[in-house]
Image (tube, rainbow, N blue to C red):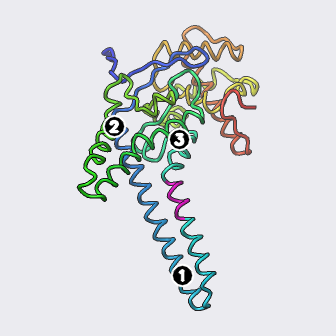
C-alpha cells in the first residue's frame, strides 16, 4: 500500500494523557462556507422574527383601537420593540456562543461544512475561549460592515470612512491566509483553531463488523474500568480508531491500560481499543437514558 503523504493541513496534538493524535485543519473554503451558511440562517431567523412581531404589533393595534386604550396600546408596542431589540442581539451574538459551547463545538453552518472549533493546547475547549473568539468577531466582521454601511448611507461625504471600513474588513478577512494554522484573530486570542470534524459513523461500522464482534468478546471490562472516562474521551478514542495509525493506537492503548490497570497482549492494541470503545459507549448511552451524563473523566 502506498505511503500516505502528509498534507499541509495535517497537525499533531498531544492530549493531557500525553497521547499524540492527528488532526486536519479546516480548509479556507470550508470556513467561509460555514460562515455564509450561519449568516444566511441568522438572516432568515431575523426576518421571520421581525415579520412575526410586526404581525403581533398589528393585532395589538387593532385590539387596542377597538378598546380605545391609547396608553395600553403604547406600552404593548413598546414591549414588542424591546422584544425585537433583544431578539436581534441574541441572533447576532448568542447564535455562535450557544452552538459552539455545545458538545459538537460547531454551529449549524460548521456542521454542514464538516468542521468544528477545538482548543490548540492540550486541554479541552473552555467557555472562556469560545466567548473570547466570538467577542473578537464583532471587531473582525460586524463593526467594519456597519462602518461601510454607514458610509454608503451618508453619501459621498463619507468616502474616507467607507474606505477605512473596507481596509479594516480586508485585513481581518485575509489574516488567516498569512499564518501557518489559518487562524483568524479571534483564534489567536482565544487559543483555538478550526479543524475537520470526525465523521460520526464509526460506531455503526464497528458494531456490525465481524472483527469487532470478535474483539468485543476478547476483552470484557468492569463498570469501574469503564467509569474512568466520559464522552470527551470516547470521541477522542473514536478519532484514533478511525484514523488507524499505529503509533497513535499504541499510545492510546498504553494510556488506557495504565489508567485502568489492565494489560493487553502484544500487538492486540486495536482489539483492546475497539472492545473498550464499544463497552464505554454502551455504558455512556445507558447513563444518558437514565438521566446521568458524564462529560469527561473529570466529571463525577
Q: CA distance from mark 3 to mark 1?
A: 37 Å
- Residue 233, percent from left and from top: 61, 27
Q: Residues within 10 Å of mark 2 (few under 14, many from 20)?
A: some
Q: Residues within 10 Å of mark 1 (few under 14, many from 20)?
A: few
Q: Which residue is mark 1?
A: 59
Which residue corresponds to the image point at 63% horizontal and 12% vertical from the top-left?
264
**Element at badge 2?**
helix
Q: Which mark is residue 100?
A: 3
Using the image, determine if residue 157 lies above or below residue 207: below
Quarter the C terminus occupies: top right
Q: Kindly report the secondary structure that dominates the magenta region of the rendered protein.
A: helix
| 40 part of magenta stretch | no
Q: Nearer the viewer, residue 209 or 42?
A: 42
Q: Nearer the viewer, mark 2 or mark 3?
A: 2
**Element at badge 1?**
helix
Span of residues in magenta = 84-91
> Of all residues shown, which one is farthest toward the top?
266
Which residue corresponds to the image point at 51% horizontal and 30% vertical from the top-left?
190
First-in-chain label (2 vs 3): 3
Q: Nearer the viewer, residue 136 or 148?
A: 148
- Residue 193, percent from left and from top: 45, 29
Question: CB under 8 Å between callouts 3 and 1?
Answer: no
Q: Which mark is residue 173?
A: 2
Q: Nearer the viewer, residue 96 or 286?
A: 96
| 88 part of magenta stretch | yes
Q: CA distance from mark 2 to mark 1?
A: 44 Å
Amino acid at each position: 500500500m502506498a505511503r500516505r503523504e502528509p498534507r499541509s493541513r495535517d497537525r499533531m496534538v498531544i492530549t493531557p494523557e500525553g497521547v499524540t493524535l492527528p488532526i486536519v485543519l479546516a480548509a479556507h473554503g470550508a470556513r467561509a462556507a460555514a460562515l455564509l451558511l450561519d449568516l444566511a440562517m441568522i438572516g432568515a431567523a431575523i426576518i421571520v422574527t421581525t415579520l412575526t412581531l410586526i404581525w403581533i404589533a398589528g393585532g395589538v393595534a387593532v385590539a387596542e383601537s377597538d378598546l380605545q386604550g391609547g396608553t395600553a396600546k403604547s406600552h404593548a408596542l413598546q414591549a414588542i420593540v424591546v422584544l425585537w431589540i433583544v431578539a436581534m442581539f441574541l441572533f447576532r451574538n448568542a447564535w455562535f456562543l450557544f452552538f459552539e459551547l455545545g458538545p459538537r463545538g460547531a454551529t449549524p453552518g460548521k456542521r454542514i461544512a464538516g468542521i468544528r472549533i477545538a482548543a490548540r493546547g492540550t486541554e479541552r475547549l473552555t467557555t472562556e475561549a469560545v466567548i473570547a473568539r466570538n467577542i473578537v468577531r464583532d471587531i473582525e466582521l460586524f463593526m467594519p460592515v456597519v462602518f461601510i454601511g454607514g458610509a454608503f448611507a451618508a453619501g459621498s461625504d463619507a468616502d474616507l470612512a467607507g474606505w477605512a471600513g473596507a481596509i479594516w474588513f480586508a485585513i481581518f478577512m485575509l489574516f488567516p491566509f498569512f499564518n501557518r494554522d489559518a487562524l483568524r484573530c479571534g483564534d489567536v486570542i482565544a487559543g483555538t483553531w478550526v479543524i475537520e470534524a470526525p465523521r460520526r459513523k464509526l460506531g455503526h461500522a464497528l458494531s456490525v463488523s465481524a472483527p469487532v464482534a470478535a474483539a468485543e468478546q476478547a476483552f470484557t471490562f468492569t463498570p469501574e474500568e469503564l467509569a474512568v472516562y466520559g464522552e470527551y474521551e470516547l470521541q477522542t478514542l473514536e478519532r484514533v480508531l478511525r484514523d488507524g495509525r499505529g503509533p497513535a493506537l499504541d499510545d492510546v492503548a498504553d494510556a488506557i491500560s495504565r489508567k485502568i490497570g489492565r494489560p493487553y497482549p502484544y500487538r492486540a492494541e486495536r482489539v483492546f481499543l475497539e472492545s473498550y470503545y464499544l463497552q464505554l459507549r454502551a455504558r455512556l448511552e445507558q447513563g444518558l437514558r437514565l438521566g446521568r451524563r458524564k462529560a469527561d473523566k473529570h466529571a463525577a
